[in-house]
Amino acid sequence: MRTIYLDNNATTRVAPEVMEEMRPYFDELYGNPSSMHSFGGQVAKKVAQARMRVADLLGARSPSEIIFTSCGTESDNAALFGALRSQPAKRHIITTRVEHPAVLNTCRYLQKEGYRITFLPVNQDGQLDLEELRAAITPDTAIVSIMYANNETGVIFPIAEIAEIVREKGAVFHTDAVQAVGKIPLNLKDSPIDMLSLSGHKLHAPKGIGALYIREGIKFTPFLIGGHQESGRRGGTENVASIVGLGKACELASLHIHDEQTRVRALRDKLENNILAQVQNTRVNGDRLNRLPNTTNISFEFIEGEAILLLLSDRGIAASSGSACTSGSLEPSHVLRAMDVPFTHAHGSIRFSLSRYTTEEEIDTLLCELLPIIERLRAISPFGPKMKASSR
């Protein structure tokens, strides 16, 4: 059975071009990039090329502003701990209630360590009140960490405005851009963003590689202490093959970003509009104007999202009820709860996330399979009578 993969915010397939570029660094070119000999030196040149490709995709001023990490979570932790250790007198952090666990749970840990954390709320569209942010920043605020785009709803925050507010107040600004990089254009050289996290496996590179952008001049204390690698900002021998893969993936993302903004967006809209038109008691969660082009989060009222996912999986269709990093929890999504999505909708929410490999034929197949599944589940739902009454 052919798989229709619509869970690209969880992870993506590795692009064939990326695989091809990585292959020699597993067997033929296995030198250590820190070695003095030319066998290692040729590997160091490839790492430098990858750093340049990442910097180009981000629009960074210099490749030296990029350090490689093991994943987005490490990048987020490095940003938070690096900023705090560089400003030991400051004890306040600001973030939001809808962050990925990589930031949210790290902030909760720091709260137990004695830091004061402000968790900013969002409105029903998943957007922030920027005046509330402005009022929350004090001279004691060390860092503000706010995600670029939400992993569950795709809602994009006005990061340029947010970063400008934070800069005016004199704090450091970090954004978890794991879902945004490669899907929307970025130009960090003209941006007040101080630090930005990305993850390779969200943009068709392998798992186990990420990067952290640190704007030139920002004080940063290493999170992972060891050797001199990454100019002393992240110890540990470089994961060369994956770094090379990330560099190639960033180069490809630059070439395909228009496709993400046009064809992928059109497929997402076709899926979404057909569901809304053909299935009663559904709603799209989040700001529909300011969203990633590949993501839709749809609630099917009165039925369980897990039941929908299992029946889709039986038909070879992969989607998600939210973040893969919170799967296994029986609690409704913390993102949807923060947005005050009604209980009967929150439990029936499904995230479909497309990629440049998604085809129109796959969207048509999904629609053919999904609609009878919803009908079947609602027929046996204990909320059936309530649903019929609400649709009259």
Image (cartoon, grey):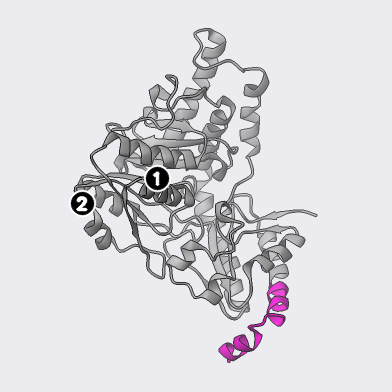
- Up the image or down, 368 lies above or below 98; here it is below
Does the residue at mark 2 contact the one at mark 1 (Cβ under 8 Å)? Answer: no
- Up the image or down, 264 lies above or below 189; here it is below
Residue 217 screen position, x and y as percent? 27, 31
**Left or right of 312 on screen, residue 154:** left
User: CA gap, disc 2 to disc 1?
Assistant: 29 Å
Q: Earlier in the sequence, mark 2 or mark 1?
A: 2
Quadrant location of residue 189?
A: top left
Residue type marked 2: Thr
Residue type marked 1: Leu
Quarter the N terminus occupies: bottom right
Secondary-structure class at tag 1: loop
* Main SS, magenta residues: helix
Residue tagged 2: 138
Residue 369 screen position, x and y as percent? 73, 68
**Left or right of 187 on screen, residue 276:** right
Question: What numbered label is drawn on residue 186?
Answer: 1
> For the residue carrying disc 1, how many other residues have a C-alpha within 10 Å: few (<14), some (14-19), or many (20+)?
some
Question: Is label 2 or label 1 in front?
Answer: 2
Q: What residue lies at 63% left-to-right and 49% top-to-bottom?
A: 357
* Foreground pick, 214 / 92: 92
Q: What residue lies at 32% left-to-right and 44% top-to-bottom?
A: 193
Q: Which region of the structure is painted magenta?
A: 371-392
> For the residue carrying disc 2, how many other residues have a C-alpha within 10 Å: few (<14), some (14-19), or many (20+)?
some
Q: What residue lies at 55% left-to-right and 27% top-to-bottom?
A: 239
Residue 32 screen position, x and y as percent? 55, 16
Q: Is residue 333 visible?
A: yes
* Foreground pick, 389 / 366: 389
Residue 179 screen position, x and y as percent? 49, 50
Magenta includes 390? yes
